Image (spheres, rainbow, N blue to C red):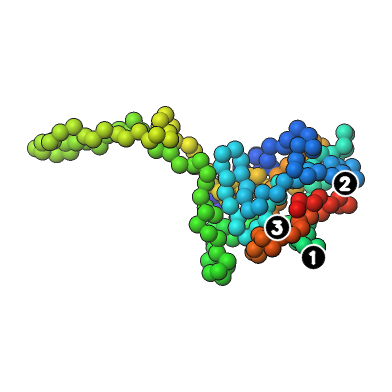
Amino acid sequence: MRYLLLLCSIFLLFGGTETKPKVDDYEVHAQAKNVAIGAEYTVHSFSRGEQMFIANDYLVMEVALFPAKGATIDVLRGDFSLRINKKEPLDAAEPTLVVAQMEHPEWQPPRDRPHPEGGVAVGNIGVVINAPQANPNPFPTSRTTGAPPPVEIPKDNPSGVTKQQVDPSALLLATALEEGQHHAPISGFLYFPFRGNLKSIKTLELLYQDAILKLR
């Protein structure tokens, strides 16, 4: 229960991703009624800073909405869909469902289970140095045979500062597109279920209101 409350708190406090200054800064962009929309296709990955994780059973899109000056937009996940190879569009999945499948791969058939890379963070490994050494003489009557071996300093992290571990589930909820009314630009990730071969994707279109963003 505490873990769930923590995830909800993170989600409410840090909803979405860092929005780029202009809609033109996104890979593709278009105008939809009173809002400009930008999008970037990140394949299976979602990230914040140096932390990146994989959601193998989903195609991931980072979308950004830029409302007209003085306008209010009502952001709804159901307004987005993804069309692959001109077939029936896919609806965006609830972030909590994506988290549930990541945390419980046993819910899926063995052939669909995420690969080990699904829970591995990029840039998330560190070694603590200058930590207290183990007592070389734990018993009063024992004698040591020499000094303890020196601490090996990793070449890739000479400072010895460890990076904070990030929970992928918490990060997914925190960076998902935040629904609700917004007066300023907003961005976040959307997840569309897909278990096919990426090479089979010939065309990829994100649909929002009357706008079509051609990602491939």
Q: Is residue 28 visible?
A: yes
Q: Give the Cα separation between the discs numbered 3 and 2.
A: 21 Å
Residue 11 is left or right of residue 76, and the answer is left
Callout 1, which amino acid? Glu
Q: Earlier in the sequence, mark 1 or mark 3?
A: 1
**Tag 1 residue:** 88
Q: Are marks 1 and 3 in contact (CB under 8 Å)?
A: no
- Is disc 1 placed on a helix, strand or loop? loop
- Is disc 2 placed on a helix, strand or loop? strand
**Tag 2 residue:** 32
Q: Which mark is residue 192?
A: 3
Indicate the position of residue 42 as horizontal and vertical percent values: 67, 49
Q: Residue at x 84, y 41 (%)?
A: 36
Q: Earlier in the sequence, mark 1 or mark 2?
A: 2
Q: Give the Cα separation between the discs numbered 1 and 2.
A: 21 Å
Could you say which quadrant of the image residue 148 lies in? top left
Q: Earlier in the sequence, mark 3 or mark 2?
A: 2
Residue 108 is left or right of residue 198, and the answer is left
Callout 3, which amino acid? Phe
Q: Which mark is residue 107?
A: none
Q: Give the Cα separation between the discs numbered 1 and 3.
A: 13 Å
Q: Residue at x 43, y 35 (%)?
A: 156
* Residue closest to the eye, 153 or 5: 153
